[in-house]
Amino acid sequence: MAITRDDVLAVLSTVTVDAAGTTLPASGRLSQVVVDPTNRVMFSILIDPSEAERFEPIRRRAEGAILATPGVSGVFASLTSERGPNQPAQPPPPAPGRPAAPPPPRTGPALPGVRHIVAVASGKGGVGKSTTACNLALALSAQGLKVGLLDADIYGPSVPKLFGLSGKPKVIEERLLAPMEGFGIKVMSIGFLIEPETAMIWRGPMVQSAITQMLREVAWGELDILIVDMPPGTGDAQLTMAQATPLSGAVIVSTPQDLALIDARRGVTMFRKVAVPILGVIENMATFVCPHCGTASHIFGHGGARAEAERLEVPFLGEVPLNMTIRETSDAGRPVVAVDPDGPHAQIYRGIAAKLWGNLTGGPAPRAAPRIVIE
């Protein structure tokens, strides 16, 4: 049985948003309703950030009403403050002679029990962002922190492969999901909820809703830091992360190549516009050392990300080499920090993690608890 947009609107007309009985479709707050070929329904409710607590029960009622509709296979319903119902799409220009107002402060409900949420982003794909995010999460965990990892790359989820995880997460109460776990890290990805060959042909609002649900409807528990592996670019997913929950900051990953640095600048600019601090830049694939002759080659150039960080006046966290061990362990689902924690590549990631934690908190990362070995 195919579900149509009109079917969805008819059901949502039974959900009111105020004491006067205004229905959700009539309120002007309802985004475009999307129904995909598998009868999954997606929509957003536009609110001001200050209305989040009042509208969360309304969102749940709307989601439940759609989920109870015969033929519906799933629902992605979210609150968004990208543009409130009485808020202009663009802020008015400043008066002549007066400086432009600073970007609005980051708002939105934080995740209970999660101290810091950090986005690992890149301006473009192919720079090793996901591999960096996974090893960074493991390096933070190795320093005694409680760490979670959210794979927010809806179109190309890589974290299940990188962590060697498969299967589907358990529902522990209502629609609250238990995260998967790998190497002591709590992990969530859209890759756990779909078949590996499935192409995510979703419009922006569906992506926004999926990310919001993976943030808020997962039992993350007590975490010192949640690392979010962002999709490449500067679009809907990044805006959703900045608006759905207060980010503590963002890390930009780039190769030294000029083409990658152009997009890295866009990433820095985007996060600054939504008032998210830049915690640092990482130069990935910085140097290749031939395993046979020991000659160092700068395949993608060298030092470009460091120079760009200095130019943009943001911290530089470190360089990660282009190395077959990192690639092989990632493909095997056993990241290098997990399989060789005392090796040279793990030490590089741990150094970067220590700098990141210091930039985030103003202090050094805690040391890992001592291990007792019985011989």
Image (spheres, rainbow, N blue to C red):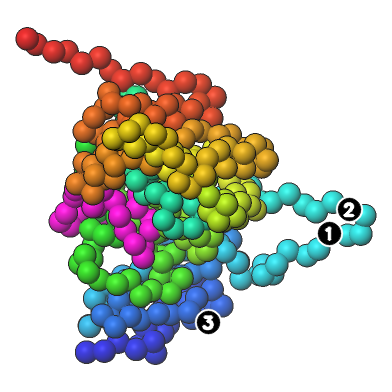
Picture residue at 39% right of the left edge, 29% below the top = 348
Reading the image, the residue beneath label 3 is 26
Dots 3, 2 in contact, CB < 8 A: no
Q: Which residues are magenta?
A: 149-176
Q: Quadrant of the C terminus?
A: top left
Kind of residue indicated by mark 1: Pro
Q: How many marks?
A: 3
Above or below — where is 261 with respect to 282?
A: below
Q: Which residue is mark 1?
A: 94
**Which image quadrant is residue 36 in?**
bottom left
Residue 171 pos. (x, y %): 20, 55
Describe residue 225's horizontal placement relative to residue 219 as left or right: right
Real-space CA distance between mark 1 and mark 2, rounded to the nearest whole angstrom: 6 Å
Distance between the alpha carbons at the discs numbered 3 and 1? 33 Å
Q: Is residue 142 left or right of residue 261?
A: left
What residue is disc 2 on?
Answer: 98
Of residues 224 and 134, the one nearer the viewer is 134
Find out whether the residues at labels 1 and 2 contact each other: C-beta distance under 8 Å.
yes
Q: Is residue 240 visible?
A: no
Q: Residues within 10 Å of mark 2 (few under 14, many from 20)?
A: few
Q: Residue furthest top?
A: 375
Mark 2: secondary structure: loop
Look at label 3 and name its amino acid: Ala
Q: Residue at the location (54% across, 73% down)? A: 29
Vertical order, 288 against 200 (above or below): above
Above or below, comparing residue 112 to residue 372 in the picture = below
The percent coordinates of residue 296 (x first, y second) are 42, 35
Does the segment drawn in magenta span residue 284?
A: no
Structural crowding at the residue carrying mark 1, measured as other residues with C-alpha within 10 Å and reported as few (<14), some (14–19) or many (≥20): few
Residue 259, percent from left and from top: 55, 56
Residue 345 tag number: none
